[in-house]
Amino acid sequence: MNKIKNIPVVRKELLFPFIIITSLFALWGIANDLTNPMVSAFKKVMPELSNVEASLVQFAFYFGYFFMALPAALFIRRNSYKSGIILGLVLYAIGAFLFYPAAAYEEFTYFLVSLWIITCGLAFLETTSNPLILSLGDKETATQRLNLAQAFNPIGSLMGMIVAQQFVISALRSDDYTAEAYKALSSEEMAAVRENDLGVISLPYIGLGLVVLVIMLIIIFTKMPKTAPEDKMELSESFRKLFANKNYVQGVIAQAFYVGAQIMCWTYIFQYVENINNGLPASEHLTATWFNVAAMIIFLTGRWIGTALMKTINPSKLLFLFGIGGVVCTAGAILLTGTIGLYSLVGISLFMSIMFPTIYGIALKNMGDEAKIGSAGLVMAIVGGALMPVLQGSILDWGGSGFADVQILGYIPEVNFSFILPLICLAVVARYGYTTYKRNI
């Protein structure tokens, strides 16, 4: 049995840069989970959008990772980790501030462009921060160290969720109407509601842009570790080594499926809850955001537990076990109706908790300078979060704009059945954990 030796996860002399870099993990967590509820929010404000069109929020947001990850890696390879972080923060702030003209012109496309620019910045931050955390210490504790750093990402996510609920969803005037009543408003009334609600949606992003600028100033005056020049290798050699590495290639595939599962579970919980509310009196309606917050707390708890378990359990084996647990919970979300199915959906987050950093650590294990380009491939895999929600949205559109227009097997609403996609994704992750464990024992 493989056990990690009694080696510190972070050595004292590297603690301060570790803390500074780890703070960025919370920063992109805020953006991620501030954006997840926007699929539902835009659908309410702009009822003319189909479920697939509304899901383009996630496509635009996560496609930025795919587009910018490799250029980010090449930029960092030529310059430095610090320059990559600063450029990422600049793009992040620009995208956030562009929400102001998007709201002024009331154009859905402009919002999509703003989100895309934000994630171009996030691609720089993730491509930089993940391999940098892996390098800040001993190789034996690299995966555990990345899980520790990633444990602060859900804290930012919780902040994003709370801001989304308190300052966006609860403030939307369009949410005060049923779909039929909203469509029945006069053109002047609907225009006033839309102007108000699009302004509400834009404000948190503009505020976030200001926070990003403050953090960027702190980073500029902070000394960061530099890349060792002796580790440099030719770009062609980096690609050759990466494509010959089965752990890496399969890891990129597993990462794409994992991110797809995560985004689908945290995005379509709003539609899942809305479908449950359709069968309840108004006084008993559930608030989807609070279930999403519960999922994130469970996710954060699971990541701390998983980090601790990796002291004695092989990361690949733990990934396999958590993958199986995720598949079981997803099956419950599909087959069980009402709040029991909702509890199963929330429970998936416990098992997703360790997946991103663990796949990352396994895929980049024992790499040298090629880890920079390798990191780009794993960040590009986040495109799974762009593609999968659109597919899930198309399932919701099978019978119309509702969430239970079609009953699969006579009793499973289409919104429940749509979670067959996260189930398949988590099965792929479980298989990656199993194959890498067997390969390395």
Image (spheres, rainbow, N blue to C red):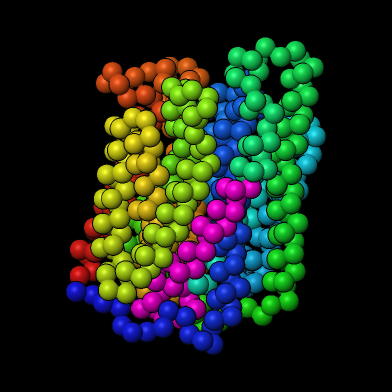
Q: For this view, does 248 lie left or right of residue 383?
A: left
Q: Would residue 383 be seen by someone viewing this image from the given angle?
A: no
- The magenta segment is 134-163
Between 174 and 207, the one lying in front of the other is 174
x and y, in percent, of residue 376 in the image: 50, 59
Name the residue located 37 percent from the left edge and 30 percent from the top edge.
338
Name the residue located 41 percent from the left edge and 83 percent from the top edge.
8
Name the residue located 52 percent from the left edge and 72 percent from the top edge.
132
x and y, in percent, of residue 38 in the image: 60, 38
Residue 146 among magenta residues: yes
Q: For this view, does 410 lie left or right of residue 114?
A: left
Dominant SS in magenta: helix
Residue 28 among magenta residues: no
Which quarter of the figure has residue 37?
A: top right
Q: Would residue 34 be seen by someone viewing this image from the given angle?
A: yes
The quarter in which the C terminus is drawn is: bottom left
